[in-house]
Image: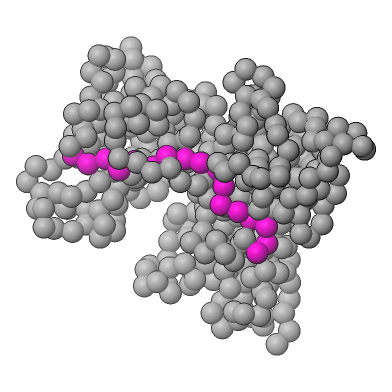
Amino acid sequence: MAFDGPRACRPHELGRAQELADLVFYHSRGRPPEVAARHPELFTEANRENVRVVRAGARVVALAAVLPLPVRAVGPIGPVTLPVGCLATVATHPDHRRQGLGHAVLGDAMERMRALGCDAGWLGTGIPAFYRRMGWETAGSKYEFELDESHAALLAAGALGLRCVPGGDVGTVVRLQAGEAVGAARGEALTAVRLDREGVELWTARRDGAAEGYAVFERSREESGHDRVLDHAGPAEAVATILGAWWRAHDEPGASASARGPASANRVLHVTAPDAPGGLADLLLALGLPHRRSYQGMLRAVRPGALLRSLGLATPVVEGEDAAGVTLRLGGGAGRAHRLAYGAFTRWLFGPERVPGAPEVAPGAPGGSWPLRFHLAPLDHV
């Protein structure tokens, strides 16, 4: 069978591309289609050139969507904003697997990221081995906490004099998130799309009527009954106050301990926090709350030389790049050369591991960080 692509999706193919995403990620798992509801920003005319497809006959049989997103990070010279390509809905129709279409459309999506000027790429996946073969690597660091009803009293923080109220507005979220050292700079339009989803609640903490912090919650519809904090910003004490107040507002003393799902008394609240000093993670760690340190997802340098320049690094420089990896050189032409595969290059940049044989980089400014601090909240996952 002849294949058409990989290439940009055409206007009349957007619906077919979305149908493939629903088939692979929802129908095949016995769930109702949710791509349009959860990520309405992907399959639109505005993002159509970033939806890369392969077609066979009347069907779209392979798909990868790119969503460009500026992300604030902290590198060796301090705060920077990186152009990042978020990779979403990488899918191949079950009838056309093991024919190289997934690798082809992923490679085409990478070329699209380069054309868009993305320095790095991010994706979330449960099959890392597939992406690792094309230079992606699990990297970056975040903290994940599980809170239950016994933790609510620890999060009271009543001395702050804050008042938690459900509701809020998009402008508040954008303004407070802009004050964070790390996180997506998504703007009001995309923030509004992300907040306008079933089961999502925005809470703010206020002092003298002004919003000081916020947290975005998502109520679970699954049997596990695990609710999530999708995003938060503001002083750690303010966010902790919101977490405690939200839990007490949703506590149901009469809930059955033997029930399952949202009605269960055994619900837990999952909280993701950046691995950054002075933030919510430090406060919750100081309380001794159960946690784990995990990866941000899978990352890849899309334009290695441009990425180093975006981080303000004058040395090392990218001397060469090929299908297998990157060659870095310290100083001038006579400096020492370092050869790193793409996965090692990614972990050298984002950590948390220290990569043997990689150049040493020391922060060049107060507050600088190496490996760099990078965070995408669950609200920004696609």
Residue at the farthest bottom position: 1
Residue sitting nearer the eye, 167 or 335: 335
Say which quarter of the image contains residue 351: top right
Image quadrant of residue 62? bottom right
In the rendered view, tell whether residue 356 sits above or below residue 187.
Answer: below
Q: Is residue 55 magenta?
A: no
Residue 99 image position (x, y, % from top left): 66, 80
The residue that appears at 44% across and 56% down in the rendered structure is: 37
At 72% from the left and 54% from the top, the residue drawn is 341
Q: Residue at x 29, y 25 (%)?
A: 241
272 is higher (above) or lower (below) than 158: below
**Residue located farthest toward the left when viewing the structure as drawn:** 254
Q: Is 136 situated left or right of 169 in this image?
A: right
Give me the residue at 18% from left, 50% from top: 266
**Is 249 placed above or below 58 here?**
above
Is 48 displayed left or right of 154 in the figure? right
Task: Please give left or right for residue 285 compared with residue 297 in the image.
Answer: left
What are the residue bounds of the magenta stretch? 133-149
Q: How is the image coloured?
A: one colour
- On the image, the x and y values in percent for residue 97 come to 59, 79
Q: Position of residue 57 (x, y in %)?
A: 67, 82
Confirm whether residue 351 shows in the render.
Answer: yes
Extreme right residue here? 333
Give the total of numbered labels: 0
Left or right: 260 with respect to 48?
left
Q: Quadrant of residue 1?
A: bottom right
Residue 190 visible in image:
no
Nearer the observer, 275 or 1: 275
Residue 219 placement (x, y as % from top left): 30, 48
